Image (cartoon, rainbow, N blue to C red):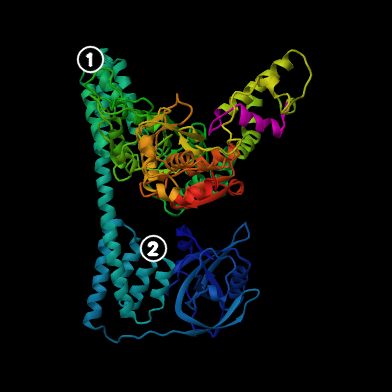
């Protein structure tokens, strides 16, 4: 049953209907009421449409016209049970019933007395309940406190009526003449808009004075709310009046200008610009500055030199995404699927992105992370940024920092300069059109150093600090712009050139080079389909055998990444396209044997392991920007004057490693079976082939020491052993970096035994399990262990 709020005519027709003499019956049909609580003496119309409600009304009309009204606990419950109905309600009389065309009934009821449900006698086809009357104390003479309380309530109602006009004049007449505290409380509650639970609590208060006191407290609150609402409306009305007045005056001014012929394109232009600024929803400080500059522009001649500069500035403010945001895709399974579709492997990076999404799903306000992908060229750092943007459902912006030398490229130029523009960061935000894109800072390690134009890397410190970039200040805009929602991703080949302060702000994720098996899988899943499509072919037109792919990878490319591999695949696809265009039939199968017809002779003879064990030659592992490589260290001894000759374009650190290796051999001459004075009679020549390529770093220390000891003792070095590690004068082996890349180089060269420092064992976890199974790792702490594994026992 629901209340009808439009019942004035209905109530007017039934105002004078006399009530029958009332006597509380013991059992009555129950009518659950959904959106109101009926109090004694209330007269109100109700709608009924549920079968149980119609049956209860019919039963009441056939008997005494009395019915028990109780409120539902849940408004939306269509079929309430016994537990869904309050036990305290009101016995009411149906004064009139009207059947409507849609099958519902409209009844006018008047509350008579409170009652309590003692027992449910039946539930079908309607509720019938046994009820008990609830009596309230009566006063033969009202105490002064009660009378004062009644007057207070009446006065508050009068004030409320004066402010909000919420009650009808008839109700106010009744309020002024009522002498029963309980009746006054019920009358007031029936005319206030209270929640069901709040009204039910008042119905269940049986002491009339206590109930009236609670009503008094409610009226106090309603009076405060009405006063505040009235004040707010008054302020809004005054503001509206002021706005309308300004609008009216401006319209008058425009009409006068049109009459005088002074209206021009400038006015329309400024009006359009003002509309754009309002649509941009600038924050308070920015809006204040924009309004100030717009007023200056209005007073300025369009031919003035500053006019175009100021107009460009305001256009930049209007076009920046101050409040525009894209909704993040928080479906982790979908995001993982997108990342896997675009890139093979790279599990560590994918896990980090999914972790960010998971936290973002649990916490709405989250600062964007500052990630840095470090790895050799061609491993997919830039394309991974695009994939992350697609997985998150965000816009993608890329800015290349390679060769950047001017700080103004980052922060912008001040507006006093002719042709000034914002920096690349603000330009990128405008290009994105939202304030939470994925922003890639490419080639961070190749940014220029400090000079008279400033230090670009220092300008990035504020940008890449989550504690500061919520108020990033560009010299041109000269207003704080919030970049805290941006996900910044920097890329670099190596970390060494990046300043330490900037490095400290980055969360570094290393992307190592790919193993041969990984390159093969990527070529089959990504590169070949893309090249087939780019060259106008279809999948059946060309096929590659697995052996052909392996040969392309090993003999036609020498890289940690995939760029050259894709170029070679593209070259084959172009030749197949030409063949089909000339009318020759397909499909074409590329095999290991016919590969040279497409690509010519192999370009790279892989740096294989030594074919036989030799004295004075050891295999080392090196890490470069292109990934891991093996290098052979050669040592020769000859009669001379105790000179150490170093060739192969070695860097300072590598030269020091050679000197440390010689000092180790001299200090352990007896243990190694050498003449203690050997160094005074010999010249020792250490050479690292590929002399045109600069080499440096401490990781060749153990290799130099092994080759040196081998040359001095005549013990041959195992050709199936590669090694890496820094050496100390005491013969200790210290940890080095790039372990995964070095192991990949060893596997490519066919070496199955790799000697690594003991402290680098933790890095072996990053190497794929399939790759670890191909290599026998020997963890060492000293040169004695290296020599025991690498050298033959006899000269």
> Looking at the picture, does residue 415 appear above or below residue 240?
above
The residue that mark 1 highlights is 305
The quarter of the picture where residue 207 lies is bottom left
Rendered-image quadrant of the N terminus: bottom right
Q: Which residues are magenta?
A: 542-563
Front residue (pair 592, 577):
592
Comes first in the chain, label 1 or label 2: 2
Report if residue 649 is visible in the image.
yes
Can residue 477 be found in the magenta stretch? no
Front residue (pair 19, 487):
487
Front residue (pair 693, 464):
693
Residue at x 46%, y 42% (from the top left corner): 709
At which x and y percent is residue 59?
Answer: 61, 75
The residue that mark 2 highlights is 193
How far apart marks 1 and 2 lie (CA) works out to 64 Å
Q: Secondary structure at mark 1?
A: helix
The quarter of the picture where residue 206 lies is bottom left
Report if residue 733 is visible in the image.
no
Residue at x 36%, y 28% (from the top left corner): 427
- Relative to 103, 474 lies left or right: left
At which x and y percent is residue 182?
Answer: 34, 78
- Relative to 394, 232 lies left or right: left
Residue at x 45%, y 62% (from the top left corner): 12
> Looking at the picture, does residue 502 appear above or below residue 149?
above
At which x and y percent is residue 213?
Answer: 29, 75
Can residue 559 be found in the magenta stretch? yes
């Amino acid at each position: 049953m629901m209340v009808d709020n439009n019942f004035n005519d209905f109530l007017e027709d039934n105002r004078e209907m006399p009530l029958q003499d009332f006597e509380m019956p013991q059992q009555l049909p129950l009518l659950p009421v959904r959106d109101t609580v009926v109090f004694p003496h209330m007269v109100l119309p109700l709608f009924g449409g549920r079968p149980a409600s119609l049956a209860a009304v019919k039963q009441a009309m056939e008997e005494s016209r009395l019915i028990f009204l109780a409120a539902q606990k849940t408004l939306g419950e269509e079929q309430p049970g016994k537990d869904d109905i309050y036990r305290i309600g009101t016995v009411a009389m149906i004064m009139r019933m009207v059947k409507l065309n849609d099958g519902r009934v409209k009844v006018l009821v008047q509350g008579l007395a409170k009652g309590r449900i003692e027992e449910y006698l039946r539930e079908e086809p309607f509720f019938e309940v046994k009820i008990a009357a609830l009596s309230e104390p009566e006063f033969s003479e009202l105490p002064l406190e009660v009378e004062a309380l009644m007057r207070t309530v009446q006065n508050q109602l009068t004030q409320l009526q004066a402010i909000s006009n919420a009650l009808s004049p008839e109700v106010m007449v009744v309020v002024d003449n009522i002498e029963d505290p309980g009746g006054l409380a019920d009358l007031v509650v029936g005319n206030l808009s209270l929640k069901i639970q709040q009204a039910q609590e008042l119905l269940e208060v049986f002491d009339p004075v206590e109930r009236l006191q609670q009503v008094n407290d409610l009226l106090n609150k309603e009076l405060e709310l009405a006063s505040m609402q009235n004040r707010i409306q008054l302020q809004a009305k005054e503001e509206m009046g002021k706005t309308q007045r300004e609008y009216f005056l401006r319209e008058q001014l425009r009409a006068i200008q049109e009459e005088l012929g002074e209206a021009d394109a400038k006015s329309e232009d400024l009006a359009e610009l003002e509309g754009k600024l309002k649509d941009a929803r600038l924050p308070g400080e920015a809006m204040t500055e924009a309004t100030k500059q717009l007023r200056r522009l209005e007073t300025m001649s369009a031919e003035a030199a500053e006019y175009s500069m100021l107009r460009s500035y305001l256009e930049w403010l209007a076009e920046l995404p101050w409040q525009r945001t894209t909704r993040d895709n928080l479906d982790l399974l979908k995001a993982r699927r997108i990342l896997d579709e675009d890139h093979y492997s790279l599990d560590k990076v994918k896990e980090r992105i999914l972790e960010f999404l998971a936290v973002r799903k649990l916490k709405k306000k989250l600062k964007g992370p500052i990630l840095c992908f470090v790895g050799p060229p061609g491993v997919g750092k830039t394309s991974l940024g695009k994939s992350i943007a697609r997985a998150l459902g965000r816009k993608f912006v890329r800015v290349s920092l390679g060769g950047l030398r001017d700080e103004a490229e980052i922060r912008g130029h001040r507006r006093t300069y002719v042709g000034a523009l914002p920096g690349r960061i603000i330009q990128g935000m405008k290009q994105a059109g939202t304030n939470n894109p994925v922003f890639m800072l490419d080639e961070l390690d190749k940014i220029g150093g400090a000079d008279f134009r400033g230090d670009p890397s220092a300008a990035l410190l504020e940008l890449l600090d989550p504690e500061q970039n919520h108020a990033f200040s560009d010299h041109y805009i000269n207003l704080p712009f919030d970049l805290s929602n941006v996900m910044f991703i920097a890329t670099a080949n190596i970390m060494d050139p990046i300043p330490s302060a900037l490095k400290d702000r980055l969360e570094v994720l290393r992307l190592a080079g790919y193993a041969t098996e990984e390159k093969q899988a990527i070529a089959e899943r990504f590169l070949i389909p893309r090249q087939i499509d780019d060259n106008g072919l279809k999948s059946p037109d060309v096929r590659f055998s697995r052996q052909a792919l392996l040969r392309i990878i090993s003999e036609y490319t020498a890289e940690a990444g995939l760029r050259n591999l894709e170029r070679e695949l593209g070259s084959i696809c172009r030749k197949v396209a030409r063949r089909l265009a000339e009318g020759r039939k397909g499909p074409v199968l590329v095999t290991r044997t016919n590969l040279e017809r497409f690509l010519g002779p192999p370009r790279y003879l892989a740096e294989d392991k030594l074919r036989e064990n030799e004295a004075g030659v050891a295999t080392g592992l090196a890490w470069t920007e292109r990934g891991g490589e093996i290098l052979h260290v050669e040592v020769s001894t000859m009669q001379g004057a105790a000179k150490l000759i170093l060739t192969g374009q070695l860097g300072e650190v590598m030269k020091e490693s050679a000197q440390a290796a010689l000092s180790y051999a001299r200090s352990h001459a007896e243990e190694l079976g050498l003449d203690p004075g050997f160094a005074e009679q010999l010249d020792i020549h250490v050479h690292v082939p590929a002399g045109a390529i600069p080499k440096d770093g401490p990781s060749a220390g153990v290799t130099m020491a092994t080759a040196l000891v081998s040359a001095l003792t005549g013990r041959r070095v195992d050709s199936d052993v590669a090694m890496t590690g820094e050496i100390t004068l005491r013969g200790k082996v210290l940890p080095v970096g790039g372990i995964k890349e070095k192991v990949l180089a060893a596997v490519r060269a066919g070496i199955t035994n790799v000697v690594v420092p003991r402290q680098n064992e933790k890095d072996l976890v990053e190497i794929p399990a399939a790759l670890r199974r191909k290599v026998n790792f020997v963890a060492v702490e000293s040169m004695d262990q290296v020599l025991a594994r690498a050298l033959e026992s006899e000269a």
